[in-house]
Every structure is written in C-alpha cells, then in structure tokens.
C-alpha cells in the first residue's frame, strides 16, 4: 500500500509511487473498477464524480443509489430498519454494482465493516482510500443534519470513534492511500487521474 499526499511527492517515494500508478493504469486497461473508501466527509462522492470524468469511466455512488431505489433517505432507512437493515441493503447493492466494469464507485463510509464487501473489493478492482484528518472532517460535517450516525449529542466525539474503529480497516483494504488536504475535490481528482494516466511521471517536493 502506498500513501500519497496530493502535490507532495518526495524524491525517495518516486519509484514506489510510479509503480503503484502503473498498477492502477493496468487495472483501468483491463476493465476493472476503482473503489473509493473513507470516512463521511472525506470527499468520496465529489472526488469520485470528477475522477470518473477525467478517466472517462462511469460513476456510481452507493448511498445515492440506495436512496434512488428505495425512494427514501438513508436516515429514514436507519430509523425504520436500523443500521443492520441498512447494511444488508448496502451489501446486496454492492454485490450488484461490483459486477460491473470500468466504474468509479464511491462507497458509504461503513461499507468496509462487511467481510463480504471487503472480499468483493479485493476481487473486482483497486481501492483508493481518501484519508482525511479530524480537522478536515469536522469542518465539513459539523453542520451536517442528514448523516444518521452523527445525530448524537456530541457528533465530534462520534467522528473520533468512527476513525478509531474504521481507519485500520481502510488502511488494510487500500491499494492506494490519498491524504486529503484542503484543496478542491476537482484538483484532488485530477491529481489521482494523473497518477493513473501517467505512471512514470510525478511531482516532487
């Protein structure tokens, strides 16, 4: 697994970074998927949509697809079925969409909790982890009212709990880790696309 901070490639990391980019380029060439994972607020949907456009691939957001198919919000599903019910729906959908090809798939933050989902990712594409700091996540989520897991008296503490619970799973699953900065999602996506399209070139600090 290679950890890359956007626009901060070091000379010592160039060889391994170039190799990882070449691997990702091969994955695109052989028609496999790219899965974006990470905590809520890490930018998976906005980065994923731009990345798909830059690479000429299809784009799917699993949370949005669940809402479109059920006709209700994820918060409503949590309210009626609980998290366990939502996770079952999520895995059924993920089994379907991961059978496709040449698609950037933005996943829900908790999709990594399922052994089945992790296995599907390993078998059917490459995984990019958008890793954001607590400061960035909190700045993006502090006024959020539609994420059911954050509807608590102390949402900042809840984010910290999710980081502690999920980060080891994200790190273990990822083929490439991208450190999220304060730059725009569009620029982050462009940098990732350049990693994939230009495996032997890169930026040095």
Image (cartoon, rainbow, N blue to C red):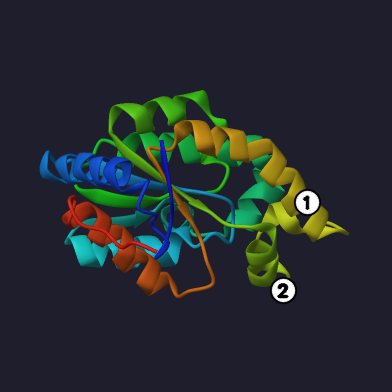
Look at 37% across and 46% down and name the residue there.
Answer: 12
Going by the picture, which residue comes out furthest to the left? 29
Splitting the image into 4 quarters, where does residue 168 fall?
top right
Screen quadrant of the N terminus: top left
**Above or below — where is 111 with respect to 205?**
above
Q: Residue at x 79, y 59 (%)?
A: 156
* Residue designated by label 2: 143
Which numbered dot is residue 149? none
The C terminus - image quarter: bottom left
Q: Position of residue 178 (x, y in %)?
A: 44, 53
For this view, does 95 lie left or right of residue 146? left
The numbered mark, 1 or 2, whose residue comes first in the sequence reads 2
Residue receiving disc 1: 158
Note whether 116 is above or below 144 in the view shown.
Answer: above
Asked if residue 12 can be seen in this view, the reply is: yes
Q: Label 2, secondary structure: give it.
A: loop
């Amino acid at each position: 697994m290679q950890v890359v901070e956007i626009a901060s490639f070091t000379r010592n990391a160039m060889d391994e970074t170039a190799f990882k980019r070449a691997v990702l380029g091969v994955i695109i060439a052989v028609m496999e998927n790219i899965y974006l994972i990470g905590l809520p607020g890490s930018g998976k949907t906005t980065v994923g949509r731009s990345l798909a456009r830059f690479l000429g691939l299809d784009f799917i957001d699993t949370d949005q697809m669940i809402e479109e198919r059920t006709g209700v919000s994820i918060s409503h599903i949590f309210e009626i079925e609980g998290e366990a019910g939502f996770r079952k729906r999520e895995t059924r959908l993920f089994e379907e969409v991961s059978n496709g090809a040449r698609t950037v798939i933005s996943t829900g933050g908790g999709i990594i909790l399922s052994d089945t989902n992790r296995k599907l990712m390993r078998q059917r594409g490459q995984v990019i982890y958008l890793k954001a700091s607590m400061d960035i996540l909190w700045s993006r989520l502090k006024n959020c009212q539609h994420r059911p897991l954050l509807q608590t008296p102390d949402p900042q503490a809840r984010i910290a709990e999710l980081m502690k619970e999920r980060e080891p799973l994200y790190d273990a699953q990822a083929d490439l880790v991208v450190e999220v900065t304060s730059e725009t999602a569009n620029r982050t996506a462009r940098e990732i696309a350049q990693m994939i399209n230009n495996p032997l070139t890169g930026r040095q600090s």
